[in-house]
Each structure stands twice: as structure tokens, then as C-alpha cells.
Image (tube, grey):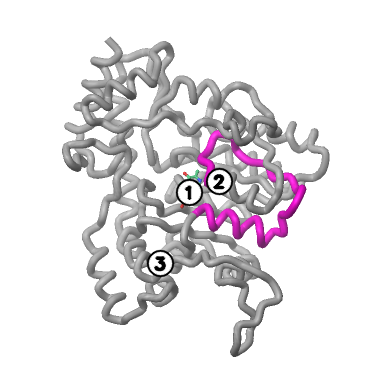
Amino acid sequence: MIQNNRLFLSPPHMSGREQEYIAQVFESNYIAPLGPMVDRFEQNIRDYTHTSNALALSSATAAIHLALRVLGVGTGDLVLASSFTFIGSIAPILYQNATPVFIDSDAKSWNLDPALLEKAIAQAPKKPKALILTHLYGQCADLKTIAQICTHHDITLIEDAAESLGATYNTQQTGTFGTFGVYSFNGNKILTTSGGGMLVSSNKELIDKARFYSTQARDHAPYYEHTDFGYNYRLSNVLAAIGVAQMEVLEKRITMRRQIFQWYREALRDISEITFMPELSDTRGNRWLTAITFERSDPERIRTHLETADIESRPLWKPMHLQPLFKNGSVFQNGTSEGLFNKGLCLPSGTQMTSGDVEYVCAILKKALR
Ligand SMILES: *Cc1c(COP(=O)(O)O)cnc(C)c1O
């Protein structure tokens, strides 16, 4: 969509029913956090992903934090994690005073390399407590292999499906393979509540515990009694109304993101130096962002050129092991994510784009390559 003539990377795309549901919230006066819309949004996610328990939260970062807290991850514990991801996936490890161990990607999925995961587990000075696995740009990691490794070594799998709502591996939803799955409804994700997240699990006890921690860990008593401390992490009933309306169009949005990817692929197929993010067989990604790499050209030069035409593009995530924050951190690397970061670019992928918009972006991009 062009807002103020600018083509954004992934702007919100409302279904049209959001204000109707928000009006219902106002009529009921459930302006407090929690209320019927939160219940309904959680039910929508349970139905869509076929999970038995869901907890609506203020963000996916909060959801990952609660997962770690519930698992008892604490000071000095090791947590394995995808290096090629967004900081929201990793910061919760630091909240718990635990230590991240970063694992690089493989070329065939751009996601966590199972062979490096095996190596990291074998060489860890003590048994890691969990793995936080990201499904980058809505594309599935090699989930089956990775889940098997986690089961074999008794390491709890947390799927960071913040970007991959609706993506499937063998028709099963990402976020439902691990002990925990996490979805984000931040402003630029495939669905948005302006800000929000969801924690899912097949284990009711774990979600009940997370719910307890998400509302200040209040004990059962008529007054405020606390034997433990928690957080204020719940999603507002007003924002959940947006989520309910957004869930009605999720499949449509995925179809459109995949269509946009195809349009790019067709429009750029003659340019041999461009490679598109792959999709593993037996998986369906949601193609949240169309991500490409350039064999020779400098992506930063392309990005600034697109910017002159008011087109927003973005470098790929800078791997965590290259971040100043983790300069002395622990990492198992093979150069893949660093190479992708140096060569890659995310193109505008908002679902209000037309084929004409995609052609326009490609025309400017081709001009920059000349
Ligand atoms: C967006 C995102 C998050 C954080 O989600 P919030 O809801 O903004 O906290 C975490 N991990 C990944 C991979 C993301 O893209």
C-alpha cells in the first residue's frame, strides 16, 4: 500500500471489522485488560493452530520471557538460540540472567543448522536448558530434525514463530512442535493488534503457570497475597478485538504474501545475481517478507536507491553473534548468516500491494543494478 506515496516494508492491513469489534468492547465497558475479546482471540488461535492452550500477552518478547521463567531458566543456565533472528527472541534470556549460545544457519533453510545444534550440545560445558528456534521471515526451519535432536537430548524446544503464524511443516502449524510456541502481533507482522503476542502449548499446567506470572503472580486470597513475583504482561481486551478481526483474514493474508513473493520472483527472474529465500520441501511458509540476496551488488546501495523512490526495504537481521552486545558471547558458526546479512535485502511485502506496486519496486531495483 502506498501511504503518503511511500511504499512501506510491511504496514498494518486491517480487515474492516476491527472497529466493529472495538465498538463491542466499548459497549461492554471491558476496557480493562482481560475480558471476552481476549478469551475469543485465544480461542481463535487455539482453533487455527490446533493447540489446546493459548495465552494472549502484550508482546512476543513477553511470551518468550514467560516461557523461560516457567521452565525455571535462571542465572548461569545455558539457552541455545538461533543467531539469525531479531533481538526480541534473545533479550528474555538476559532478563533471566542466563547465557545464550548462538547457532548459525544452514544455506538450505536460512534457519538454524541442525548439524551445528548437535555440535553445540556435544560441546556445551553443561546441559542447555532450552532451545529458542526462530522461523525466519515466516519460513520453516528444519523442524522435524531439530525437534528430534531436542527430544533425544532432553532439551526443551521453544519455537519463536513470531514471524511465522500460519506457516506449516507437513501441514502442522509452526509453534506447535515445541513445548512452547510464540506468535507476535506487532505492527509490521502478518497480523497485528498494534502490539501483542501469544504463548501456546499443549501442556495446560505450563500455560496456567505462565498466566499466573503474567498477572503479577497473585495468590488465591481476597487481598493481594504474593509468595512469588511476576509481570504485567497481559494483552488488553481492546487490542484483542483487533486480533479477532485480523484472524478472520489470516489465510487470505498468507495467500497474498505468497502471491507477492511469486510476483517478485517472476519480475526478477532474469537477474541471475539475485537469489530468493528458499522454502524447505513439505513446508509452507507464510512469506511474511520477501527476502533476497545479491551475488555481487552491495545491498546497501540498492536500499538507498529504493529509498530515493520512497520505497522502504531493510537489510536482513544482523546475526546475534555479530552484535556488539554479544561480542564475547558463545557461538557455533559457519559463516552462513553473516554472508546472508552482508548480501541480503527484505523487499516491501505488505498485503495491500498490487502486482503494479511489485513491478514498480522491481523497475527501480533494476535501475539500481544497472
Ligand atoms: C517481532 C519478533 C519478535 C518480538 O515480537 P514482539 O511482539 O515485538 O515482542 C521476536 N522474534 C522475532 C523473530 C520477531 O520477528
Q: What element carries label 2?
A: helix
Q: Is mark 1 within 8 Å of ligand 1?
A: yes
Q: Nearer the viewer, mark 3 or mark 2?
A: 2
Q: Quadrant of the N terminus?
A: top left
The correct choice, above or below, for 55 with respect to 107 in the image is below
Sequence-first disc among 1 and 3: 3
Residue 161 horizontal side relative to residue 125, left or right? left
Element at label 1: loop
Looking at mark 2, is its residue's CB closer than 8 Å to ligand 1? yes
Q: Who comes first in sequence, dot 3 or dot 2?
A: 3
Mark 3, residue position: 41
- Judging by the rendered image, the residue that carries numbered circle 1 is 162
Figure check: 67 above or below 330: below
Using the rendered image of the protein, determine whether residue 130 is visible from the camera's viewpoint.
Answer: yes
* Disc 2 to disc 1: CB gap under 8 Å: yes
Disc 1 residue type (three-letter): Ala
Quadrant for the C terminus in the image: top left
The x, y position of residue 74, in whole percent, is: 73, 54
Residue to which mark 2 is pinned: 89
Q: In this view, does 191 lie to the left or right of 310?
A: right
